[in-house]
Every structure is written in C-alpha cells, then in structure tokens.
Image (cartoon, rainbow, N blue to C red):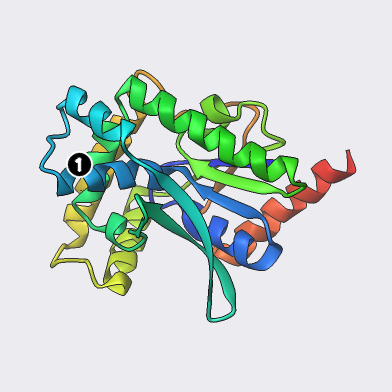
C-alpha cells in the first residue's frame, strides 16, 4: 500500500509518519528532507538559492539516501547526503526557506519526484507498505496512492509546535513565536503558488484538522482508513 500525506508545515505530518514507521513497520519517506538536503549542500558551498545553473550542477553530483538505523530499540530513518548523516543539520532554521525556494525549480522537482517514486516503488515491490509525506504527494508524486490524506491546523498552533520542536533540538536560536508565525505564513504562500508541485487540497483526500487533536487520535483515524481500504 502507498499512503500519501500532504499539508503545510507544523500540521503533524512528520511526527505521525515517524510513529507509523516505529509502531506499524510502514516504510517512511520524508520527501521534504530531500529538498532540505540539497539546500544544506548549497549553503555549505556558498551557492545562492536563486542561482539555478549552479544548483542544478550540484544536484547532478549529489547522492541522497534514506538509511534505517536502530536507536534505543526503535528503527528510525536517517538522511544521508553524499555519505554523511545530516538528519539533524537539515532541521536548522536557516535551511527551510532555502529548501522552499529551491523546490520551485522545475528540474529540481522533476529529479526529486523521480527519486521519490523509485524509492517507494522498490518498497512496494518487496511487499512493504510505504508512507510518503510532503506537499505534492497526492497531486504529483503518487496521484493514485491507495490512501490520500491532507493534514491541516491553525497557523498559531503550527508555529507553537515548530518552536517547541526547535527548542527540543536545541536550535531555536532565540526565535520567538511571532517570528515563527511569519516564517510559516511566508512558506505557505510560497508552497501554494509554485508553478509545479504546489500545495493543494483535493476532493479525494481525507481531510484531517489536527488543531485541537492529539497525535494518537489522528493516528487512530488514519489506521481506520487503512483498514477500510484493505477490506475493499
């Protein structure tokens, strides 16, 4: 089964996907991490986010992998860039806006979408379920996914969650809630107005508002949808 989860930042997509991976042995592909990895590499090499030619040159010589690791008895996914684990680095505050801008480059998106499909299809061929989360999973990457979900939440709540996540990672860098809200609103605007791979909610997606709900409730609802589809 292929499960696609779309939605703006801070709605719980990554948290939910990780729990599905840990508890239900469903393979997880964080598509946004690919763009963050490329953004990180560009930043490390002093390449400006609007230098499309240089970005595409870097992309040709870039290897992004998802590697499963056992941490405290849990199987977690690490993001490997050119042989280096950058799982923590790509969550820095300065990476997200660069990744959002880079993801607007059509050739970058085409490359990443091909890679996402390749990885997911390899899991499916080996008899495993796979969950992908991002912005355009159900509209571009896998429009025929078995289960399509759109997560949403109030902007302030999303910002509070993001700020708490950064604090837990020790990378909040003195940011306050107002700054996070502004960053999220700008990113939403960018994501919704991309020429290719824009964030869109479609009629055939299961809509879930996570504003006033805990993670367990949302996972239960998604599991019910999974079981419903399996019985069809």
Q: Which quarter of the rendered picture does the N terminus lie within?
A: top right
Q: Which residue is mark 1?
A: 42
Q: Residue at x 38, y 43 (%)?
A: 63
Query: Horizontal placement of 31 versus 155: left or right?
Result: right
Per the image, label 1 sits on a secondary structure element best described as helix
Give the residue at x 12% y 35%: 48
Would you identify the image quadrant in which residue 190 lies? top left
Whether residue 212 is visible, yes or no, is no
Residue 16 location in percent, x, y?
55, 58
Nearest the camera: 126 or 88?
126
Q: Nearer the viewer, residue 80 or 138?
A: 80
Q: Quadrant of the C terminus?
A: top right
Where is residue 221, by image quadrant? bottom right
- Please tell me whether residue 52 is drawn above or below residue 79 in the rendered image: above
Residue at 61% over, 57% down? 218
The answer to which of 42 and 222 lies nearer the viewer is 42
Q: Estimate the x, y position of residue 113 in percent, counting from the top left.
A: 48, 30
Say left or right for 23 vs 87: right
* Residue furthest to the right: 231
Residue 166 appears in the picture as rendered: yes
Position of 60 relative to 122 (above/below): above
Image position of 99 with respect to 65: above or below: above
Q: Residue at x 68, y 40 (%)?
A: 2
Label 1, residues with CA under 10 Å away: few <14, some 14-19, many ≥20: many
Outermost residue, bottom side: 72
């Amino acid at each position: 089964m292929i499960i696609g989860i779309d939605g703006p930042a801070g709605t719980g997509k990554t948290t939910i996907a990780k729990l599905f991976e840990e508890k239900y042995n469903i393979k997880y592909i964080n598509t946004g991490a690919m763009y963050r990895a490329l953004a990180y590499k560009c930043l490390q090499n002093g390449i400006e986010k609007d230098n499309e030619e240089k970005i595409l040159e870097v992309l040709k010589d870039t290897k992004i992998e998802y590697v499963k690791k056992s941490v405290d008895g849990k199987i977690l996914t690490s993001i490997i860039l050119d042989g280096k684990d950058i799982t923590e680095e790509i969550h820095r505050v300065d990476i997200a806006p660069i990744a959002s801008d880079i993801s607007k480059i059509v050739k970058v998106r085409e490359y990443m979408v091909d890679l996402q499909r390749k990885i997911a299809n390899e899991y499916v061929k080996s008899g495993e379920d796979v969950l992908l989360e991002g912005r355009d999973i159900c509209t571009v990457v896998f429009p025929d996914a078995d289960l399509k979900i759109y997560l949403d939440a109030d902007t302030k709540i999303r910002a509070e969650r993001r700020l708490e996540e950064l604090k837990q990672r020790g990378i909040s860098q003195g940011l306050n809630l107002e700054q996070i809200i502004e960053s999220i609103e700008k990113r939403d605007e960018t994501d919704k107005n991309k020429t290719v791979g824009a964030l869109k909610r479609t009629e055939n997606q299961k809509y879930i508002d996570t504003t006033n709900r805990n993670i367990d409730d949302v996972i239960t609802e998604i599991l019910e949808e999974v079981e419903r589809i399996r019985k069809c």
